[in-house]
Image (cartoon, helix red, strand yellow):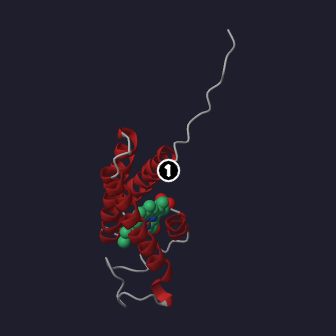
Amino acid sequence: MFVGGYISAAGLGLTCPEWPLCPNGIFPNEEYFIEWVHRLVAATTGTLVIATSVASWINKNAGRKIKFTSTFAAALVVTQITLGALVIDLKLHAVLVAIHLGVGILLFAMVLLTTLFAFKITKPRIETKT
Ligand code: HEM
């Protein structure tokens, strides 16, 4: 999200006009570097988010809540990467860029909730004397 915000603010969104790879191929070069980083981080994030979801279904101790948030996150990350391709294809259409930001925020929220459930971080119970 940080790299995407920088690309957007610096007006570098169309420096790499192709998808999934930039015109020079798989390795980075100076011209497309920032877009290359955004895609590399997206691919890594996508792999980790989907792996987390699969792990939540395999693990017998995983509860319903973590299964829901991790699966929702996996669906969002696939949507987000597809949207990224559309953002490029439709030359940074404002509505698509806005949806790309919104889905990114929702994805962040689901990943955060998954982490909280995984470590069972809940509000401490306040003991009241009656
Ligand atoms: C996990 C996956 C991804 C996340 C979380 C993500 C997140 C973001 C965010 C937060 C922004 C800034 C939006 C704004 O400030 O309005 C952004 C911008 C952008 N993203 Fe992504 N992104 C992801 C994947 C991709 C992919 C796979 C592509 C394309 C191959 C892509 C292409 C772009 C482009 C071109 C911009 C700049 C839009 C502009 O210039 O206004 N993103 N991304």
Residue 85: x %, y % from top left: 32, 69
Residue in the foreground of this view, choosing between 75 and 71: 71
Question: Image quadrant of ligand 1?
Answer: bottom left
Residue at left 41%, top 75%? 14
Does dot 1 land on a helix, a strand or a loop?
helix
Q: Image quadrant of residue 82?
A: bottom left
Instruction: Tell me if the residue at label 1 has its CB under 8 Å from ligand 1.
Output: no
Would you call the spot at circle 1 few (<14 residues within 10 Å), some (14-19), or many (20 or more)? some
Residue 30 shown left or right of residue 107 in the figure? right
Q: Is residue 5 above or below residue 57?
A: below
Front residue of 12/85: it is 85
Q: Can residue 13 be seen in this view?
A: no
- Residue that lies at the very extreme toward the right in this rendered image: 129
23 above or below 105?
below
- Residue of label 1: 115
Percent across and percent down for residue 61 are 38, 45
Q: Which of 119 and 48 is in front in this view?
A: 119
Residue 6 or 95: which is nearer the viewer?
A: 6
Q: Which residue is drawn at 50% across and 62% down?
A: 1
Tell me the residue at 31%/77% (across/down): 20
Residue under the image location 31 percent in, 60 percent down: 78
The amino acid type of the residue labelled 1 equals Thr
Residue 115 coordinates in the image, percent (x, y): 49, 50
